[in-house]
Each structure stands twice: as C-alpha cells, then as structure tokens.
Image (tube, grey):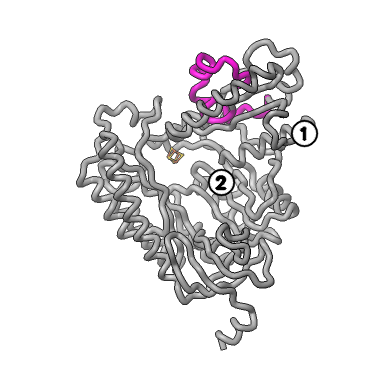
C-alpha cells in the first residue's frame, strides 16, 4: 500500500513539474512515506530523518516532508523532536502537496495536515510507476475491522471503496504501460463493495481486461471470504490460485482478544473449503506471536493450526504494542525472550512446511511468469508461479513478462528449480 501511495505522490509531483533524482544531494524536495504498523518501521524513519538533518543544514531551502501513517500517528512527537521537518501529511492529505510546493518560498511555519477523510480515495489521481512486471492498484482505503493490535483504522481511517470504473481505467492504463500482472490492494481487500457489486464482481471485470496476464490481491480477511469469490478465482485462468489468509493466532481466546471475528475451527474449515474449491491453491498467512496474555498452550495451538493448514509461506512477527490501540493497554504483556523463542519456533515450523509444500510441485509442469535475471547466474531466469513461489531455470528464448511452462525438478529453501518445457514438448508429453 505504501509503494502505491508513493507512486501516487510521485504522480502528483510530476504534474507539478518535479522529477525524480537518484542524487539525494541535488534534491529540492524529499518526502519520506512512512509506515506505523510496527515499532521497527517507526525507528527506521526516525533514523533516516536524523541522517537527512545534515542535508537540511547544508541547504535550508530543501523541503523535507513526512507522509503517511507515521505522520498521522506521531505528528506531535515529530514536531517536537524533529523541528527541521517542514511538512507532515497524513494518508488522506496528499492533495495538499501542489499547494504546499507552490507556496514553498513563502512557507514560514510547518505545514501539518493529518485530517482523516471519510471520502478520500484519490479517484482521479494516477500513480507514476516504475517500469516492471507488476502494478499495484489500490481499490479501497482504510479499515473498519478494528483488530485490537492494529493501528491502521486510526491512521488510515474508515473503509471506503473506489468506483469499479476508476479501477478498470487504471488497470487499462497499467497494461498500456507494459504491466502484465495486477495486484489489487486494500487493507481489507475482500470487503470491497460499491453499488455495482462486491469484490468478486470487480475481480471478474479486471480479469476481462485484455492484456492482464495475472491478477493477485492482498490482504483479504477470513471473515469476508465467500463462495462467490472462490468461484471467480477458480474460473478465471488469469486470477492466480493463491490466497493470502491471515491467521494471526491459533487460540480462540487470543483470536477473540485480537477481535479477529473468527474461531480456530472456522479458520480450519475455510482452509479446507478453499482447497476443495480451488485444488492446489497456495495459501500464505500472517502470524503474530506473543500477543498479550498468550499462554504456552495457546501458542501451541498456533503451531497446530499452522501445521494443519500447511501454509505455503508466512509473514511472522513478534507482537509490537502500538500506542493508541486496545491491545497496547492490556496489562499482561509477554516478555521479550518468550516472544523471541516463539518467533523462532514458528519460523522453524514454517521453513519445514514451505519446503514440504514446495516439494509437492516436483515433477509438475507449472506456468511461470518470467520476471528478472536470477541473482545467482546471468544464464538463468527468476520467475514466479501462480502460488507466488520463485522458480529458477535456464534461459532459452523467453523474455521478461512471458508466461512459460517449467518442469519443476527440485525444491530448496523457498525456491523451486526447473527446466523450461517448449510448447512442442508439452504437446508430445500430453499425447
Ligand atoms: S483487518 Fe487488517 S488492517 Fe484492518 S484492523 Fe485488522 S489487521 Fe488492521
């Protein structure tokens, strides 16, 4: 989402006559787009700002701004501790940028705008994207779920969806600019809805846009995963058979404390249901360990659900209290060493599960979207399967953005290794 927002801001800056420089010393304006989801992300921004302070001292005309969720969340702290920051804009205030740049010579004071909007979806603004394979397209902003650990509803405001027409126009524009994969984004992507329909209707419309080779979406909430959506994923060849399904925790008591609105049993049934609807569907997840009050036996349930669900991959984190959220106020926080030990356990388990899941592909021919040269050899390509797993294979006559068939011969760590199968060989094999 932050990549997308940075691209939106880059589009606005371009319209104002600014262009990107690789040489920070020559920049007239520097914006840091920030994330507040974990403490570590905030620390990174503080460190970066301290580093940028010397540029500001050298060049007082330099305009330095902090955008996004951290601006929203920590504006007072920033004003107090980093008075050299000129501009602080929350995620709903990017439209102020042209006016601020126009007036920059007359700027005497800090420009701060962190008002949250019930309506802002940047419908008429187009991002300036780098060349590449995948285009991120935001379809909604904000979130109404209020998980007790999460700062997003406070930094990004209430959930609102963009019009289907605006999204399709952006998809068409991305395809015209050479992008072949579209990733639809929302804090809670599958609760998207407008008068024209729910998320599955939008997905069908995107799938019908000529030139879209692959579609992904992130992040859905298990509660909003319905059969209409699964049917559409199963039906359209260009919608990847891949679902990111955040579990967060395996114990019902902890899920309730997190306000996740599903139980362990419902989650396991859903995983089963997805795999029946979409055979061989890859599923990834998010896990938080050491949520306040999580007991050893409750953590063991997270391990159990991970094992039963056989996730293909997982994003795993230690719980990090976010001031202002309900969970941060709980009194039974878990000690750092316990969190660390639990994190190591989930990582070790997921490593085994990922390898096991990847090994199931050995001997299969999978469509792979060629993305870039392998880091290890200029003679090899790296591309991804529908399930989002990297595949390394020898170069022949294909080029980036082609989808080619690769016979998977080996699985190591998180990557697959294989050999390109030409169309003729495929016909032969089928015969
Ligand atoms: S659904 Fe996701 S974005 Fe919304 S509150 Fe929960 S974790 Fe945060």
Residue under the image location 68 percent in, 22 percent down:
63
Q: Vertical placement of 419 versus 104: above or below?
A: below
Residue 208: x and y, percent? 66, 60
> Residue 403 — which label?
none
Residue where numbered disc 2 is placed: 185
Q: Marks 2 and 1, how far apart in space?
A: 24 Å
Can residue 314 be seen in this snapshot?
yes
Residue under the image location 29 percent in, 28 percent down:
330
* Span colored in magenta: 67-96
Residue 223: x and y, percent? 41, 48
State which quadrant residue 269 falls in. bottom left
> Residue 15 — which label?
1
Q: Is residue 112 magenta?
A: no
Quadrant location of the C terminus in the rendered image: bottom right
Quadrant location of the N terminus in the rendered image: top right
State which quadrant residue 397 falls in. bottom right
Element at badge 1? Answer: helix
């Amino acid at each position: 989402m932050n990549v997308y927002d940075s691209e939106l801001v880059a589009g606005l800056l371009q319209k104002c006559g600014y262009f990107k420089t690789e040489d920070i010393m020559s920049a007239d304006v520097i914006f840091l787009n920030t994330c507040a989801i974990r403490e570590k992300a905030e620390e990174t921004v503080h460190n970066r700002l301290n580093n940028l302070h010397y540029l500001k001292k050298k060049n007082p005309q330099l305009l330095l701004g902090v955008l996004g969720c951290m601006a929203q969340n920590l504006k007072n702290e920033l004003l107090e501790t980093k008075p050299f920051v000129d501009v602080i804009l929350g995620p709903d205030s990017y439209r102020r940028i042209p006016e601020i740049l126009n007036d920059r010579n007359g700027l005497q004071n800090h420009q701060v705008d962190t008002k949250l909007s019930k309506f802002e979806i940047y419908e008429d603004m187009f991002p300036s994207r780098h060349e590449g394979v995948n285009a991120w397209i935001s379809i909604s902003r904000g979130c109404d779920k209020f998980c007790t650990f999460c700062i997003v509803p406070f930094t990004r405001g209430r959930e609102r969806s963009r019009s289907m027409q605006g999204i399709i126009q952006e998809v068409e524009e991305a395809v015209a600019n050479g992008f072949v994969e579209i990733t639809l984004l929302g804090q809670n992507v599958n609760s998207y809805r407008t008068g024209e329909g729910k998320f599955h209707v939008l997905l069908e419309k995107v799938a019908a846009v000529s030139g879209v080779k692959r579609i992904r979406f992130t992040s859905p909430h298990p509660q909003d995963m319905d059969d209409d959506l699964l049917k559409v994923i199963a039906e359209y060849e260009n919608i990847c058979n891949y679902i990111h399904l955040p579990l967060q925790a395996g114990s019902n008591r902890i899920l309730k404390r997190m306000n996740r609105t599903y139980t362990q049993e419902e989650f396991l049934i859903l995983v089963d249901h997805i795999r029946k609807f979409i055979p061989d569907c890859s599923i990834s997840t998010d896990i938080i360990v050491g949520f306040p009050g999580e007991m050893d036996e409750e953590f063991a349930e997270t391990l159990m659900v991970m094992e039963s669900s056989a996730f293909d991959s997982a994003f795993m984190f230690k719980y990090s209290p976010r001031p202002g959220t309900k969970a941060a106020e709980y009194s039974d926080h878990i000690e750092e060493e316990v969190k660390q030990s639990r994190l190591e356990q989930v990582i070790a388990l997921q490593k085994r599960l990922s390898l096991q899941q990847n090994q199931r592909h050995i001997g299969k021919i999978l469509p792979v979207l060629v993305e870039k040269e392998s880091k290890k050899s200029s003679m090899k390509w790296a591309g991804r399967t529908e399930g989002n797993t990297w595949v390394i294979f020898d170069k022949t006559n294909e080029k980036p953005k082609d989808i080619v068939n690769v016979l998977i011969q080996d699985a190591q760590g998180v990557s697959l290794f294989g050999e390109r199968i030409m169309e003729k060989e495929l016909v032969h094999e089928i015969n």
